[in-house]
C-alpha cells in the first residue's frame, strides 16, 4: 500500500498559498487501519476505498467480515477480492437481530430466495481459510416456515481453527457426521433444529475444550442432555414463547460449571448427573406451563434434588413467582442449606424468603421482589409467614448488610417482614424499599409512618424509600 501526505492548495486574493495538511489517519500502519475497519460492517469498510488512493485496497486486508442485509452477489464479490488467505471473524446477519445477514435481493420489486449453494460455498470458503469466529443467523427466515432454513456443510463440524461458533435459526445439528472441533471454546445454539435427541450430546462430544455453552431450545427435542467436563458457563433457555421451546426431560452433567442460567417451563424431570461443586453463580427462572397438565408432586421431587445441586453458590438469582402450586409442594420438604450464599435476588412469595433466611447463614445482600398473583383468594393463603421462625436466622445476627425490597404495597404481611428484618438484623447498614409508581400518596404516607416507628436492631441502619419498581 502507498503512504503519503495529502496536500491541498488554496487560492486566496489571486495569490497562491500552499497549505499542507497532514492526513494522520492515512499515515497509520496498515495493521492499525485494518483493526479500525474490523469494527465496521464490511459494506461500510469497502466504501472507504474511495477516500484516497492510500485507502483503495485496505478493506481487502481486513480479517473480520460482517455482512448484514447485504445482497448475495456483493458477499461473493467481497470474498473473491480479498488479498489475504485467512479470515478471523465471519458474521452473517439476517434481519434486525444482533447476530447476522439478510439474504433476499430486490430485483424488479420481486424477492429472490436464498441460494443454498452460495451459503454452503461461503461457509466452506471461510472454514478453508482458518476462521476462528463464525456467527450465522437466519432469524427472519426461520419465522417464515415457507422458506427452507439453510443447511450447514459437513466441513463446519471438523473445523480445526474454530474458537467461537454461534448458530441462530439455521441448519440442522446432525447425529451421523464426525464432529471434531478441538479449539472451540464458545458455542451458542439459538433455536436451531436437531436431527434427534442425541444431536446435542453428539456435538458436545467433539468439543474437548468447550467453556461457554448457550442453548435456546427449538421445539423439536424431548430429551435434552447437556454433558461436558469442561464447560464453565452454561445458559439454557427453554421458555421462548414465540418458538414454544420446551424439553420434557433435562439432564445436566457439567461438573466444572461456574455460572448456570436456566429459563424453563417446568420439565417433567430435571436432573444433574454430577455434583456442581464449582458452581458459584446461578440465575434460575422456573415458569409454570399452564398449557400442560402437570403432576406437581412429581415435578417438586425433581426440583428439590435440583435445588440441592445449588448449595455451593455464592450469588443466586431465583424467580419462582409464576409457579406457586409447585412451590407449595416443595416448601415442606426443602432442607437445602446454602452455606456459601452471600447475595440473593429472589422473586417469589414471602414463604420462600423465610426458607432462605433460615438456610443461608452467610447472606450479606438480599433483594426481594414479591409478585402478586391475579388469583386473590389463593394469593391470600400465601401471604404472611406460615411458620414463624423459632429463632432469629443466623445471617441476620452477623452478616446481612443490605436489603432491597421491591414492589412493596404496604400489606400487613409485608410490614411484618420489614419489622422482622429491621428488628433482628444486627449489622444491617441499609434497607431500600421501593413501591409501585401508581401507589397512592395517602398509602405511601401511612406506610412510611408505620415503618419509621419500627425498632432497629442496628444503630447504623439507614432506610431509604423510592417510587420505582423493577426486577
Image: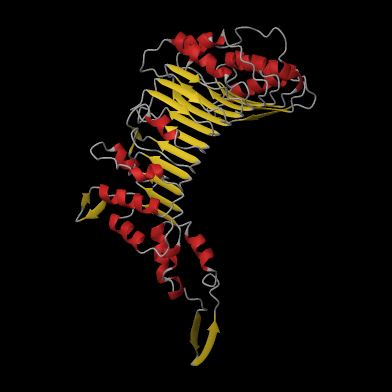
User: Percent position (x, y) of residue 2?
Assistant: 48, 76
Find residue 29 and report its horizontal and vertical position in percent. Answer: 54, 69
Residue appearing at x 30%, y 37% in the figure: 143
Say which quadrant the C terminus sits in: top right
Q: How many marks?
A: 0
211 vs 294, nearest the viewer: 211
Is residue 453 visible from the viewing direction of this image? no
Percent across and percent down for residue 103 are 29, 49
Q: Nearer the viewer, residue 236 or 23?
A: 236
Q: Residue furthest bottom?
A: 14
Q: Is residue 53 above or below residue 293?
A: below
Q: Is residue 265 visible?
A: yes
Residue at 46% x, 54% y is 88
Q: Is residue 61 above or below residue 260?
A: below
Residue 40 higher or lower than 431, as above or below: below
x and y percentages locating residue 465 in the rendered image: 65, 29
- Between 259 and 231, the one nearer to me in the picture: 231
Which colour assignment does the render follow? secondary structure
User: Toward the viewer: 153 or 360?
Assistant: 153
Q: Residue furthest right?
A: 459
Amino acid at each position: 500500500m502507498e503512504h503519503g501526505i495529502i496536500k491541498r492548495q488554496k487560492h486566496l486574493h489571486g495569490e497562491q498559498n500552499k497549505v499542507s495538511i497532514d492526513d494522520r489517519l492515512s499515515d497509520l500502519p496498515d495493521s492499525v487501519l485494518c483493526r479500525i475497519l474490523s469494527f465496521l460492517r464490511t459494506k461500510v469498510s469497502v466504501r472507504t476505498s474511495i477516500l484516497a488512493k492510500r485507502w483503495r485496497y485496505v478493506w481487502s486486508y481486513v480479517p473480520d467480515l460482517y455482512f448484514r442485509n447485504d445482497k448475495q452477489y456483493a458477499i461473493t464479490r467481497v470474498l473473491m477480492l480479498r488479498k489475504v488467505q485467512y479470515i478471523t471473524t465471519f458474521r452473517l446477519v439476517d434481519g434486525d437481530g444482533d447476530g447476522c445477514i439478510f439474504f433476499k435481493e430486490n430485483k424488479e420489486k420481486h424477492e429472490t430466495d436464498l441460494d443454498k449453494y452460495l451459503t454452503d460455498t461461503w461457509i466452506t470458503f471461510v472454514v478453508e481459510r482458518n476462521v476462528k469466529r463464525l456467527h450465522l443467523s437466519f432469524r427472519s427466515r426461520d419465522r417464515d416456515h415457507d422458506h427452507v432454513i439453510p443447511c450447514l456443510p459437513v466441513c463446519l463440524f471438523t473445523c480445526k481453527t474454530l474458537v467461537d461458533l454461534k448458530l441462530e435459526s439455521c441448519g440442522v445439528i446432525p447425529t451421523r457426521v464426525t464432529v471434531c472441533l478441538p479449539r472451540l471454546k464458545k458455542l451458542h445454539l439459538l433455536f436451531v433444529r436437531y436431527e434427534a435427541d442425541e444431536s446435542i450430546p453428539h456435538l458436545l462430544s467433539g468439543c474437548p475444550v468447550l467453556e461457554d455453552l448457550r442453548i435456546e431450545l427449538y421445539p423439536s427435542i424431548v430429551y435434552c442432555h447437556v454433558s461436558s467436563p469442561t464447560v464453565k458457563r452454561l445458559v439454557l433457555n427453554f421458555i421462548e414463547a414465540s418458538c414454544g421451546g420446551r424439553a420434557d426431560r433435562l439432564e445436566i452433567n457439567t461438573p466444572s460449571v461456574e455460572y448456570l442460567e436456566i429459563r424453563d417451563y417446568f420439565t417433567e424431570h430435571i436432573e444433574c448427573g454430577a455434583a456442581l461443586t464449582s458452581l458459584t453463580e446461578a440465575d434460575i427462572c422456573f415458569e409454570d406451563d399452564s398449557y400442560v397438565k402437570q403432576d406437581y408432586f412429581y415435578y417438586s421431587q425433581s426440583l428439590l434434588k435440583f435445588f440441592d445441586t445449588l448449595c455451593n453458590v455464592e450469588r443466586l438469582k431465583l424467580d419462582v413467582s409464576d409457579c406457586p402450586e409447585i412451590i407449595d409442594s416443595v416448601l415442606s420438604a426443602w432442607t437445602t442449606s446454602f452455606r456459601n450464599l452471600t447475595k440473593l435476588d429472589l422473586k417469589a412469595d414471602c414463604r420462600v424468603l423465610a426458607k432462605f433466611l433460615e438456610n443461608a447463614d452467610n447472606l450479606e445482600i438480599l433483594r426481594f421482589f414479591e409478585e402478586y398473583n391475579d388469583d386473590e383468594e389463593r394469593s391470600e393463603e400465601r401471604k404472611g409467614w406460615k411458620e414463624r421462625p423459632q429463632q432469629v436466622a443466623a445471617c441476620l445476627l452477623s452478616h446481612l448488610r443490605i436489603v432491597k425490597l421491591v414492589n412493596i404495597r404496604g400489606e400487613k404481611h409485608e410490614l411484618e417482614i420489614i419489622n422482622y428484618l429491621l428488628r433482628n438484623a444486627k449489622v444491617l447498614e441499609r434497607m431500600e424499599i421501593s413501591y409501585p409508581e401508581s401507589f397512592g400518596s395517602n398509602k405511601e404516607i401511612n406506610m412510611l409512618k408505620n415503618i419509621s416507628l419500627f425498632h432497629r436492631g442496628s444503630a447504623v441502619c439507614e432506610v431509604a424509600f423510592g417510587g420505582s419498581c423493577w426486577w
